[in-house]
Amino acid sequence: MTKKTLSTEPYKGVRDFYPDDQAIQNHIFGVWKTVARRYGYEEYNASLLEPTELYTSKTSTEIVNEQTYTFTDRGERSVTLRPEMTPTVARMVAGKRRELSFPLRWFSIPNVFRYERPQRGRLREHWQLNADIFGVESTVAEVEIIALAYDIMKAFSAKNGDFEIRINNRKLLNTLPNGAIPLLDKKTKMSSEEFENEWKKISDTPFTLSVDEETRGVLDKLAARGITNALFDPHIVRGFDYYTGIVFEIFDTDPQNNRSLFGGGRYDNLLELFGDEKVSAVGFGMGDVTIRDFLETHGLLPKTISATTVMLCPLSMEFTETAETLARELRAQNISVAVYYGEKKIGDQIKIADKKHVTFIIVVGDEEKNSSRYTLKKLEDGTETAGTADEIAKKLSSV
Amino acid sequence: MTKKTLSTEPYKGVRDFYPDDQAIQNHIFGVWKTVARRYGYEEYNASLLEPTELYTSKTSTEIVNEQTYTFTDRGERSVTLRPEMTPTVARMVAGKRRELSFPLRWFSIPNVFRYERPQRGRLREHWQLNADIFGVESTVAEVEIIALAYDIMKAFSAKNGDFEIRINNRKLLNTLPNGAIPLLDKKTKMSSEEFENEWKKISDTPFTLSVDEETRGVLDKLAARGITNALFDPHIVRGFDYYTGIVFEIFDTDPQNNRSLFGGGRYDNLLELFGDEKVSAVGFGMGDVTIRDFLETHGLLPKTISATTVMLCPLSMEFTETAETLARELRAQNISVAVYYGEKKIGDQIKIADKKHVTFIIVVGDEEKNSSRYTLKKLEDGTETAGTADEIAKKLSSV
């Protein structure tokens, strides 16, 4: 048998998150969670494996088979890797309809899957914040959901001028002739001329829509909250069929990157699929790839965040035990400490600490072993603080 | 067309996490992350979709096909939902072998998948802490990994008497006759008599093993750290083929639940699969289902944790705006606030707050609207604090 070497590449179209990338994911997820909780949204989750029927009822089997990961298990069940979270959350809410207290405010950060043709080089898996409010018929729900989305953008340090919130109403769109919604949905991918030509095929009068009362009310309430970068845009459609009222999309205003970042809307009829009475729902989804791209474009990503506060550097391996004892004392005070294990010299150990974005080092040798006093050195500027383990722990806890 | 009602059940063998269950998951994941970071472990992640070859090289194709979710994508690639994280982390470390600084301390909390026959009612998806240290040949790595596992158990408030750490050495096991390791691996599933009968088929002398020097050294170092519930157990094997040295398992000592909770060990040769030179590695995995079960058995799960600190209860819908303004002021101070939207009376609103485990409520009516002074009421004991929005925020920040 010849020895075959395995590839270190991940599966096509998905990402590996090495610590530096995971730190950025954690930053994004952290902002999402903090702001969602500030609005009283509770976290839920579900498996990414779902029965295929969950998607076929609202979508054609063809689309499900071509754009999702769907396979048959050994029990002859058809399983799909969820392409979006809304059908799942609707299923869960319908499943405990009688036990849950409304209004229900829920959020989750699921990974979702799309079968993209390999040659396009597009991602097949991404993570997405989903925030939804259930059981509120009035547009206070839309205002809250849009305000939550806005506050997340602000928590990422975006300014009002960096993005805009474009709002439309499906009820208004439903007054348009047949074929108008799919055409509007594709509008950003065609020239004005192409759009006008296509429009002429479905209507004799030019495309026009004026803001309705409901949308106007939402815009006014947002303005009263200081959300002045929201506007009516008759071209906003949102791809999914299940929307029933207000829909919105957040756009990057950067001329280099003037595209939709994320969006959402009202979907009041989705729970009826589960044989349940109507439950009002408004929500949005926000993807990690798009938001990371936005933060990079606008210079809003924080500098590298270190997971480890201190690295202990033994002068030689015989001081590993002394370093271990100090590590235990500091860890008991909740300080993040790594001990260098190996035979490299101090200079090389410091290079490693630097590469791992460690904030402080403590060298451990004979002097430290005998005196039980240590010198904490900040790598960034070389400043030093000396003291016992306890004094060093206090100093680090106050940083 | 007849309207077909969709089931609200999740896919067979996987779980939905409603907020109360997700709060327990977050508690478990929180302890895992805190302790791992305290030891300087950095978080990484990867997709659950992996090329099937990652598993076939170390395992027979039959096992891969029967015990994993494996399917062929439209690009004729065979894809597997990861059944464990170790091959993935080995792939990632091998992939950036030259750029990474060793020792490398990494952790992740992936979900992993096993194809279980439906009738057994066993779970097909669970989450698992994986912590690994790479690049350390000496047993300081085993000592650190076991100490980390021990500290996690302590952080869950387990006492030394609640669990024990059983340690063995694959090098010692390799001195046994052919067939001994698979037999030992099945030992807990058979009676002593069955085991002895089976043993006679492979050896003329009774089964016996004495502790080796390496294992003794690890036990001594653990004892020096106060880890006194570790012992040598010649029956510990660990199922996976890739282990090369010390292996360990943590057992529940409860006679009602005396079983293996989790384990790990040294696997020095796994990176060779990627055509790379040898990289020493020691790690362990710890599953959410088993640990939750352990915490429940020992009464160590915390009481329900609320995601939301305050619910604002408008006396009637006309006070929603006033409540919204107060909510904004409190949220600006990072306080988690939900506003009740709906037409229920105060008494019913309080019942909802209670059901959602909200800590405080503030009723908002005419008096509050005119005076801009509010009364914060703690639901648990009815205690009240009055003040302006700012004073209430200060009070809540100090809770």
Image (tube, coloured by chain):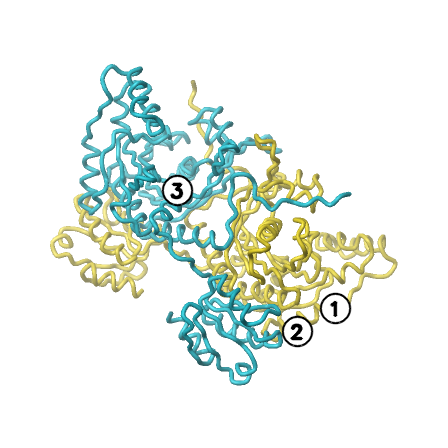
Chain colours: A cyan, B yellow
Residue B98, percent from left and from top: 59, 55
Residue of label 3: A290
Alpha carbon separation for disc pair 2 and 1: 12 Å
Q: Is residue B188 depicted above or below A331 in this figure?
A: above
Q: Position of residue B315 (x, y in %)?
A: 19, 48
- Residue beneath the point at 20% across and 38% down: A219
Q: Nearer the viewer, residue B169 or A394?
A: A394
Q: Nearer the viewer, residue A136 or A338?
A: A338
* Residue that numbered label 1 is attached to: B211
Whether A221 is drawn above or below B307: the answer is above
Amino acid type at mark 1: Val
Name the kind of residue labelled 2 in the image: Asp
Q: Residue at x 44, y 43 (%)?
A: A127
* Discs 1, 3: same chain: no
Residue A75: x %, y % from top left: 61, 33
Disc 3 element: helix
Q: Which residue is mark 2?
A: B220
Q: Is residue A133 left or right of residue B122?
A: left
Which residue is painted at 62% across and 76% down in the image?
A318
